[in-house]
Image (cartoon, grey):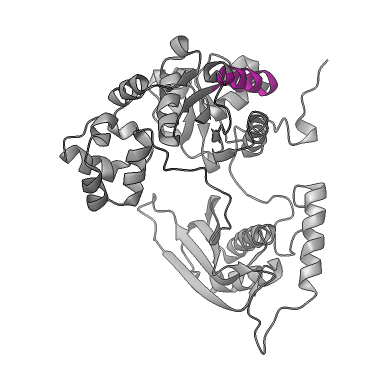
């Protein structure tokens, strides 16, 4: 059996844990730079605040309806997510973290367990230890556990937040109930093609002939179909080494000077290098991206990028930052107001096993230096050691005018009990 454990309105729930005054009140969480709504509480949804709403257009609506609007507090959300996932590992060792607020778990050797009771235990422990409400869907396959979770979320009073699909009757009933577009793995394009075939619900999809599904679509859609039939074809994903690593961000303001952009690119490149070292990889290729603000139609637009092939594989922050900064200088245009930039490293190879260059290789001093920097930054956090061309005060410059305290990750923001 599999379970899909999903945190309810996760970002809003994290804020409520430490600020009880927000309970039962509408909450909206904004994206980077306080741009648009990326998470809403049930109360905000009921008032009609749409997902993705640009806050500058909906500011009046939020004030009129007393919606609490907050900036994204990613350090808090990430820490609370880690706590929830750690608790799940107490129930089974087979846990796949699917996103920041949900995880699949697999129950091997749990044949004689009462899964309704076990799901309730999971919910209660997470709620008691973290304050985060969850819903649990349990079924013979991953795709069906997603369906079961949606039922638990839709009917909290009847299910107590836990729904188990453990019979053929429940499976058929669930597939009749869930619409095609709400099925995990069925996007807009696939949904459109299936509707042309007369499919409206998940049950219609699973009743299609296997041969037709494989011939018309691919092995992926066939596996999803079999999973919804109760035949497990989608296993837990194992942690794999990434083939490319990217760090892209919008600026807090538009920049038209090269100095600010060079600083941002250096910071993004350093972040990529740190991620490379963490997974034991080095890169052959650097891809630098620079974009103007596409929303400002009256401004000059410029969208550009540059690919750099390195003479040798590296994960040194010094080397990657140096090449990235030189690249952005070469593609920068005066008079353009830039809003977004990014660095992508690819062509990854294992650091301890790659082809050496006959004439050019990295300075051997870089490896112990990077190791020392990583160790100090891990010990003292907040990136105390940086390159000279980085801003020494902040790693990510974002507009966060409505930011709540980082209650669990910053000692200065810890709650004081009087």
In the rendered image, residue 26, in percent from the top left (x then y), is placed at 50, 19
Q: Which one is in front, 327 or 163?
A: 163
Magenta range: 118-134
Q: Is residue 276 left or right of residue 189?
A: right
> Residue farthest to the bottom?
359
Q: Which one is in front, 148 or 401?
A: 148
In the rendered image, which quarter contains the C terminus? top right
Q: Is residue 135 left or right of residue 354?
A: left
* Whether residue 39 is situated above or below residue 300 in the rendered picture: above
Residue 38 seen by the camera = yes
> Residue farthest to the top?
157
* 124 within the magenta span: yes
Q: Is residue 187 left or right of residue 308?
A: left
* 110 within the magenta span: no
Residue 384 seen by the camera = no
* Whether residue 380 is situated above or below residue 366 in the rendered picture: above
Q: Which one is in front, 297 or 282?
A: 282
In the rendered image, residue 269, in percent from the top left (x then y), is placed at 62, 63
The residue drawn where x is 72% and y is 30% is 407
Q: Main secondary structure of the magenta part?
A: helix
The residue drawn where x is 47% and y is 65% is 335
């Amino acid at each position: 059996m599999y379970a899909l454990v999903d945190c309810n309105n996760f970002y809003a729930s994290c804020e409520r844990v430490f600020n009880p005054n927000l309970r039962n009140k509408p909450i909206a969480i904004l994206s980077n730079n306080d741009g648009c709504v990326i998470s809403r509480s049930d109360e905000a949804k009921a008032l009609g605040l749409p997902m993705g709403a640009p806050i500058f257009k909906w500011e009046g609506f939020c004030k009129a309806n007393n919606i609490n609007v907050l900036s994204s507090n990613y350090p808090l959300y990430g820490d609370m997510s880690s706590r929830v996932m750690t608790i799940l590992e107490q129930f089974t060792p087979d846990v796949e973290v699917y996103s920041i607020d949900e995880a699949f778990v697999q129950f091997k050797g749990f044949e004689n367990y009462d899964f309704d009771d076990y799901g309730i235990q999971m919910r209660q422990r997470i709620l008691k230890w973290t304050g985060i409400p969850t819903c649990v869907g349990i079924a013979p396959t991953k795709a069906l556990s997603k369906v079961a979770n949606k039922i638990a979320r839709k009917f909290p009073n009847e299910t107590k937040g836990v729904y188990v699909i453990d019979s053929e009757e429940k499976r058929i009933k669930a597939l009749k109930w869930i619409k095609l577009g709400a099925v995990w793995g069925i996007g807009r394009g696939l949904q459109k093609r299936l509707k042309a075939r007369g499919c409206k619900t998940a049950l219609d999809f699973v009743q299609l002939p296997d041969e037709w599904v494989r011939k018309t679509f691919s092995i992926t859609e066939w596996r999803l179909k079999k999973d919804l039939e109760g035949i497990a074809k989608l296993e837990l994903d194992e942690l794999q080494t990434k083939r490319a690593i990217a760090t892209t961000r919008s600026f807090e303001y538009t920049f038209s000077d090269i100095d600010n952009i060079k600083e941002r690119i250096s910071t993004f490149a350093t972040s990529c290098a740190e991620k490379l070292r963490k997974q034991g990889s080095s890169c052959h290729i650097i891809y630098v991206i620079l974009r103007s603000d596409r929303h400002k139609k009256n401004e000059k637009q410029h969208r550009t990028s540059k690919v750099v092939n390195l003479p040798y594989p590296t994960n040194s922050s010094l080397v990657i930052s140096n090449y990235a900064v030189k690249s952005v200088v070469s593609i920068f245009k005066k008079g353009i107001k830039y809003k977004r930039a990014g660095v992508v490293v690819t062509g990854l190879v294992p650091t301890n096993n790659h082809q050496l260059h006959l004439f050019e290789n990295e300075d051997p001093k870089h490896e112990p230096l990077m190791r020392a920097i990583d160790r100090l930054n891990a010990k003292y956090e907040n990136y105390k050691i940086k390159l000279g061309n980085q801003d020494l005060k902040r790693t990510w410059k974002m507009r966060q005018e409505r930011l709540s305290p980082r209650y669990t990750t910053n000692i200065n923001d810890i709650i004081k009990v009087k």
